[in-house]
Amino acid sequence: MFRIKRLYTFMLQTFLPLFIMTFGICLFIVLMQFIWRYIDDMVGKGFEMIVLGEMLFYAALFSVPMALPLSILLASLMTFGNLGERLELLAMKSAGVSLLRIMRPLIILISFVSVGAFFFQNNVMPVAQVKLYSLLYSMRQKSPELNISEGVFTKEIPGFNVYVREKDKTGLLKDIMIYNYSEGFERIDVTLADSGRLKTSADKLFLVLTLYSGESFQNMPGSDKRDQNVPYKRESFSEKELLIEFDANFVRTDESFLQNRFMGKNLKNLQLSIDSMSVRLDSISDLNAKAVIDQSYRKILVPHVPTESNNDSSQVSTLTEVIIPKDMPTINIDSLYQAEAPSSKAAILGRVKSAIDNIKAEYYFKSFNIADEAYNLRRHITEWHSKFTLSFSCLVFFFIGAPIGAIIRKGGLGTPVVVSVFFFIFYYMINNIGLKMARDGVWPAWEGMWLSSFVLAPMGIFLTYKAVNDSVILNADTYLNAIKNLFGKRATRKVEKKEVIIFDPDYPSVIGKLSELEDLCKTYLEQNKKRINYIAYWQRFGKDQRIPELSEKMESIVEELGNSKHNLVLNKLMDYPFISGYTLLASNKFSKISIALGIFIPLGIPLYLGALYQRKLLLHDIQVTKRVSSELNEMATKIISPTE
């Protein structure tokens, strides 16, 4: 009987709530960004709640490809960060469970999520994109609700400018001025009224403006436009109604024009469109190339040799190639032109210029057609690749988030959110760069669409490898200690008195070791008084086997005297420095690389100066080691033979 292991159940129960929570948060954030982007198309147009709800639903589906990878990254990072912070991850590893085995149920789960993301991209996203973009287009085309402001001209009514000085609480408009230029500025109509009211017709196709106590003036231009005296018509009224065409209804746009574009096609339809568009683009290019040959002067001046191509039903004479006879006389066009009369030359140049302009305009038009066809083809290819990139990015983000969480061992919404946002912004920038490069034809489509995956996948593999091997690559203390070592701030040694001592130190033997260590330090200081030159340093790249030997002898003395009962000895042991971390002075196996670095002066000089600084710190540490060894030697001698 198949049973899921308790460990796998625990991991799924830990990950799934965090994944659902982070997916909801990320989807909400991306949806708010979408609403903020299109807020001008939605506000002030009187849309019903069902229309706004439909738009938000399709916008949420449209935002899933952006929210899903981010939520996987954040959830995996929080899951393993919480396990590491609560020492549960350490307990699992102590029980002999490897990190990959701990990740196994989540890897299977994310694999199913990736497969689901592919089907979502292939089946749901085309429908959601068509519905969303057609709805947004319809919302943009809808006329806004008319809102006449006080003291300014309102231009929201096509063909009219309306000015209202004041509005009261009942909606009565006072001191109205209307400019009607719907029939052109030559027949402009200016209307002044003491007050009026505005309402919409029952079918929302017209505005009904009722005016009280006013006058109207309209130009009546005649047929003779040279006449400066333009007659006009004047009308006085006590009450007048103006019927203004103003469609305030919401009309949905037909979705068929978007279904035939790249955004409304699934994988199968995209492949069919790519094949047909590639054939059409190649045929257009061949026809344009043939037209260039046909319009060239060589094709016009050189006689053509026809060849017969037989067919079952008919025989068609085609021109396959241009053959230049060997006895073809040479034509000097310049001499022919110079032989013409001046008036004929001008006519010839005019005809040539006109022909060149026509050919240039024709080729510009053809180039625009080819560019449009090529752009449409590239958009189809990028959309084809996007069906797969989402699924792969989900896997990549999991193998980035889980190892980082296991390494930094920080849970909650603090550090994981910062790290996740950083990686996602990096992914988003690279993905957009690749998409634009592929869309504009700078790169092949597959390179641009898979650029982010090519960059982040090695990073995920590297982080997973480091996490499996318990690396401290993301441990802040490691880098702080390295910086301290670089600037000479060495870590202090801590030696505490042991409560239970099994073996006391062998002081006579320790005295011999201390004397030997002191002599080694003295010899090393005497032999390294002079500064090493640049060439000698790169010949051996700081190779010095005596440094590890000094460090080993000193550590053995510290380990043995650490069992001492005397506090003075223990305190003095803490004065011993750590003779380690001098990376620029360590031995290097790659002698050829070191020689190359020395020859490359811009890189070799900084490394050489850093090595000189570390050598100065090393000599100081050896001097301290020599002094401490001498003092410990005196203490050990007094312990063996105390004086009265």
Image: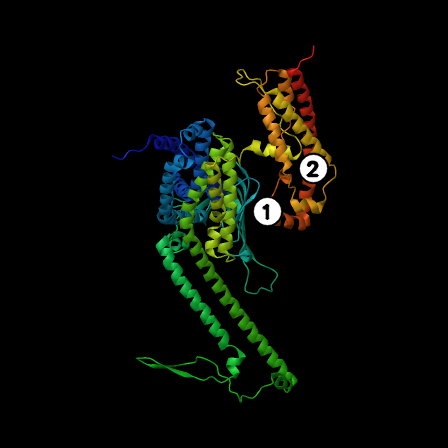
Q: How is the image coloured?
A: rainbow
Residue topped by disc 1: 590
As drawn, is 83 to the left or to the right of 503? left
Q: Which residue is mark 2?
A: 613
> Which residue is located at x 46 percent, y 61 percent?
374
Image quadrant in which the C terminus is located:
top right
Task: Tell me if residue 574 can be seen.
Answer: no
Q: Is 7 left or right of 538, judged from the image as shown?
A: left
* Residue reaching furthest to the top: 644
* Percent position of residue 513, x then y: 63, 26
Q: SS for tag 2?
A: helix
Q: Is residue 624 above or below residue 342?
A: above
Q: In terms of sequence position, does the residue under pointer 1 or pointer 2 come before the other?
A: 1
Amino acid under disc 2: Tyr
Q: What residue is drawn where x is 56% and y is 72%?
A: 357
Instruction: Report the amino acid beneath label 1.
Output: Phe
